[in-house]
Amino acid sequence: MLSTHNLTAFYGDFQALFGIDLEVNAGEIVAIIGANGAGKSTLLKAITGLVSTHSEAVRFMGEAIGGRPAHRILSLGVAMVPEGRRLFPSLSVEENLQLGAYRKRAGPWTLGRVYELFPALSEKRRVPSTALSGGQQQMAAIGRALMANPKLLICDEMSLGLAPIVIKAVYDALPSVAAQGIALLIVEQDVGLAMRVSQRLYCLQEGRVALAGRSLDLTRQQVSAAYFGI
Amino acid sequence: MSFSVERATRASRIGAGLTIPALAALVTLPWWGESSWMRTFVEFACLLTLAQMWNLLAGYGGVVSIGQQAFLGLGAYALFVLADHAGVNPFLCVPLAGLIAALIAVPTSKVVFRLRGGYFAVGTWVVAEVYRLLIANASFLGGGSGKSLAAVRPFSKALRESVTFWMALATVVLAIALTYLLLRSRYGLALTAIRDSERAAASQGIDVDKTKLWVYLASAAGCGVAGALYYLNTVRVSPDAAFNVGWTAYVIFIVVIGGIGTIEGPILGTLIFFLLRETLADYGSVYLIVLGAVAVLVMVRFPRGLWGYVQQRFDLRFFPVQRRVRLDAAAGAAPHSR
Amino acid sequence: MSGWLDTLIQGVLLGGLYALFAMGLSLIFGVMRLVNIAHGDLIVLAAYLALVVVDATGLGPLGALVICVPVMFLLGYALQRGLLNFTLGGDILPPLLVTFGLSIIIQNALLQGFSADPRALRLGGFETGSFHLGAGISVGYFPLLVLGVAVALAFALELLFARIPLGRAFRATSDDPEAVQLMGVNDQHVYGLAMGIALAIVAVAAVFYGIRTTFAPTDGPDRLLFAFEAVIIGGLGSFWGTLAGGIVLGVAQAVGFRLDPGWGVLTGHFAFLAVLLFRPTGLFPRTR
């Protein structure tokens, strides 16, 4: 469904990614791990169009989409839950969700379905998004991305700053999302969590893929060697 | 690793060598030049002083004001009031006008510094309008139609023009020299730090508000002197002319076209302004349309201005304000990685 | 006493026009924090556009709106996408300088094309008609219409921002111009639409302004300052605030004018400075 080929990305003169090859197939949950500064967020930004790259570097549903503007890439069916939630403070919870459906892509996800998935949001629909707890904000951010009815959902650092019990509640929602046929690409700091929820895993180190494989087959030693570069 | 810190450049040494004969030629101009040249030079010097002041304020201090005409107008009216109503020697009034403009800038800053960014810019303009309207309503200053400078009548035309010319020359040289020295001092470093990031500068122990205030006051003084000189040259003032926002508009265009945040930029920009005005003199205000369009183009395409472009391309600096670390040959190949 | 009441009423009516000047500026402040120095000159430009349309088509000034509003909308959209979008982001100097440049270009181009003579739009009598409230107070039909249009516009813009998907996109883009792209919103297009709508409002304001008083190529800067003052007095982020700010400014000017005809504009500026000193967030800032 999604593949990257020799993907490179720069911030001015600084090269952040050095030829990343990655693949996500329909119905799969794929995780990306790596230390701070390994290039995880840049990779997601390059895929979603927030950081520019060459057009053949990213292919989605057979189309070369690298370097297209972010709003076009969303229209094709790639939605992202950005790091730090990035909810819009001057919009209510429901308005944030509605904005997710701005492109009016057809599909199963509606306000009702999102509230079914996250009942806590249903009670808070009228309050400003800033009045939510951290976990509820994360749920709203996921719900907002689902409202776009994506084929591929990208989640950046969803566990950041959340209590373990809240992290579990957030991640418990993912299987039912995947059951709708949505592929998931997840960036996660918590390596154990990433290995548990994903079917395949990529480990980035200094802008390169240091390790790739089926999550079940990889050993802790392999992962930490790739993670720390020792 | 051995290195040395460089503050001069080859261009700055050549520039210094050329400046002295050029200045000598200018100083003697009243004996060999025509009086129209002197009048044009005074205008040039005033505009260049204003441009340096705005460059100091915005290009180095990051304080983008579009109300500097307030201090130009106040300086001009300070000259007329002191000379005609208080009997002060009109030439002595010029430095006093700068002082008065700076004094009025103190309470002014209390009001306008409440605004930030673009709102600050328009706020300074409103304040300039307030001063214009107050003066236009003062009948003893001639109201809206303005007044002529009576205090210069006792002086011969030649004497008046020569002295005005020398004062203008001294003012513009001082404006450039003081800006240069200020920027090379530790205050210059503080200013540049504030322009780049107020928060980071504050965390380094720089008193951001105080530094900005001082630059604002210094700039007001410079504008006041330029205003007094300009209207000493024309001998007639009116509120609409002296407080015209056009002053600030042209000055901003000059600085941006020449290259903001450099001392050479405003000089180059002022030359371009006069060149445009003289070449398009037969087409009314067309030169202003061209000037505006060029400024817009430069801002969008070459945001560092013409001098910024030259500097980048040829590494040419006549007024080096930065410190440059020069590594010795062996150390120059030190690995550089991120 | 009735003299002061009359001054108050005339001030409120004048404020309606200032609110019209300010609505477009308030909109682009709200969506993209852009301080458009050319706003006043665009008002004057639109008034000349209406003049040309009236002369060319024989439509009345109000009928000319049918042409002026869409033309100004397109101009705004093109200006934003073709030029102003390149100045947005971080540094405050580029948008200020570019709009300042536009201001000087528009003023001098109008001077070249139309000379410095003041012009006016004529409505054939309606603009001078009035009715009496008694006690020597009369209210002009036309200023009342202007105030009514200002109120209706404030209402419509509040509704747009609160209820319509485009309004949500405006607010979200203002909050976080990067994240909004991940929702499929084209921020560049949104800015274009915001400027388009702002200049469509400018066209309406310009026609009423041209009917109410004469206009000349160099009148733009004053219109900008009045609009700016109305927005700041009212408080950023609320169109009702902008309406109120326009009315406060209008009343301040009317009171000053009554004290001394030379003071009208000055007392308006004083009201603005007083708000800055004592209530820097404006009278009716958006609280959420």
Image: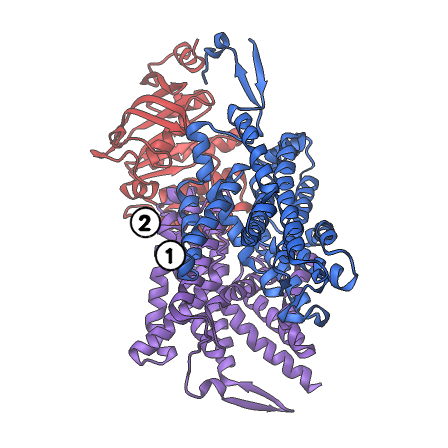
Chain colours: A red, B blue, C purple
Residue B279 in the image: state x and y as whole percent: 41, 53
Closer to the camera: disc 1 or disc 2?
A: 1
Q: Quadrant of the N terminus of chain C?
A: bottom right
Above/below status of B132 relative to A227 = below
Q: Nearer the viewer, residue C73 or B41?
A: B41
> Residue at left 43%, top 36%?
A82
Disc on res. A199: none
Q: Residues within 10 Å of mark 1 (few under 14, many from 20)?
A: many
In this rendering, position of residue C94 left or right of residue B141: left
Taking the view exactly as shown, the residue that stands out farthest to the left is A62
Above/below status of A183 relative to C283 = above
Chain letter for mark 2, please: A
Residue at the spot of label 1? C193
Residue at the spot of label 2? A103
Residue B282 in the image: state x and y as whole percent: 40, 60
To which quarter of the image does residue C241 belong? bottom right
Residue A87 can be seen in this image: no
Q: Residues within 10 Å of mark 2 (few under 14, many from 20)?
A: some
Residue B246 in the image: state x and y as whole percent: 53, 57
Q: Nearer the viewer, residue B3 or B77?
A: B77
Residue C199 in the image: state x and y as whole percent: 41, 63
> Residue at left 33%, top 28%?
A29
Element assignment for label 1: helix
Amino acid type indicated by mark 1? Leu
Amino acid type indicated by mark 2? Arg
Number of marks drawn:
2
Element assignment for label 2: loop
Distance (Cα) linking label 1 and label 2 = 17 Å
Residue A79 can be seen in this image: yes
Chain letter for mark 1, please: C
Above/below status of C60 relative to A69 = below
> Residue at left 69%, top 57%?
C277
